[in-house]
Amino acid sequence: MRISLFVPCFIDQLYPNVAWSVVRVLEGLGHEVIFPQGQSCCGQPPFNSGYWDEARSAALVTMRAFRDAEVVVGPSGSCVTMIKVFYPDLFKGQPEELEARELAAKTHEFSSFLVNVLGISDVGAKFEGKVTFHDGCHGLRELGIKKEPRVLLEKVKGLELIEMNEAETCCGFGGTFAVKFATISTAMDEVKCASIIETGVDTVVSNDSSCLMQIRGMLEKEGSKVRGLHLAEILASR
C-alpha cells in the first residue's frame, strides 16, 4: 500500500521522532510511505475557537496536499478527528464539501489503521517496562478508539500494561483551552498525573503528542520520573 503520512504541527515542530517512528513501523510492514510536502496545519485551532473561515483557509491547504492520496495516516487522534469528523461539517454547503468527505473517508489514525485496516496486532516490537495508557479525548470520543492501542501494546515483548483509574479522564490540554482556562487545565492535569503515578509505571503512552506534552509538564513539575512516549515510539522499539 502507498501511504501518505499526515504529520500534525505539534509533531512536526516538537516531536519529529514520532513521525519517524510511524514511518519505521509502516515500512517494516512492507508498505511505501510518502510525505506530501504541501501539508500544513489542519485548521483545528481556529475551528475550535469559532473562526471557521480561517479554519477553512488552513484546511484547504491540507486537502490539496492529500488530494491524490490512496490512504492518509496520522499519529494523532485529535488532528485526524479534525479531518475525519469535522472537515465534512466545516465544508458543508461549500464547493469543497465532496472533496472534504472523500478525504475524511480515506484518513485514519495510526493505531486504528494498523488494527482495523491492516488487521495487524503484532508489529514485532520489544520494549522493557511497565506502561499505562492515556486515552486522548478526540481519539476516544470522536473516533471511538479504545481497544486498538491496547491490542498493539499487549503484543509488545517485555511490556507490561497497567491500566490507570483515570485512563479516560481529560488531561486538560484541549489546545486553546489550556491557554484560556489555565487554572482549570492545571487542576485537570493534576488529577490525570496523580492517577498515572499511582500505577507505579515507568512510562505513560498516548496517541497524542499534545496530550503528552501537557502530562509531561506536570510530571516533571511534581518531580516524577515517569516518562511520556507516543504509541508509535513504543511500536518502533526493538
Image (cartoon, rainbow, N blue to C red):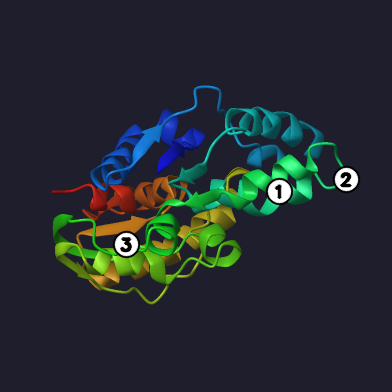
- Quarter that holds the N terminus: top left
Q: Going from the N terminus, do you reach mark 2 or mark 3 first?
A: 2
Q: Please say if 60 is above or below 158.
A: above
Assess whether mark 1 and mark 2 are in contact (beta carbons under 8 angstroms).
no
The spot of residue 149 in percent (x, y) is 36, 63
Position of 25 compared to 103: left or right? left
Position of 25 compared to 99: left or right? left
Kindly tell me whether residue 49 is visible in this rendering. Answer: no
- To which residue does mark 2 refer? 93
Q: Secondary structure at mark 3?
A: loop
- To which residue does mark 3 refer? 120
Position of 152 compared to 191: left or right? left
| Marking on residue 233 | none
Few, some or many residues within 10 Å of mark 2 (<14, 14–19, 20+): few
Mark pair 2, 1: CA separation? 12 Å
Q: Secondary structure at mark 1?
A: helix
Q: Which amino acid does the dot numbered 2 rest on? A: Gly
Q: Please name the residue shown 50% across and 37% down the image.
A: 8
Question: Farthest bottom residue?
Answer: 165
Q: Which amino acid does the dot numbered 3 rest on? A: Ile
Q: Please name the residue shown 23% across and 47% down the image.
A: 236
- To which residue does mark 1 refer? 101
Q: Please name the residue shown 24% across and 58% down the image.
A: 203
Kindly tell me whether residue 78 is visible in this rendering. Answer: yes
The spot of residue 224 in percent (x, y) is 25, 55
Q: Please say if 202 is above or below 211.
A: below
The spot of residue 122 in percent (x, y) is 24, 62
The spot of residue 216 in percent (x, y) is 35, 49
Q: Which amino acid does the dot numbered 1 rest on? A: Arg
Which of discs 2 and 3 lies nearer the camera? The answer is 3
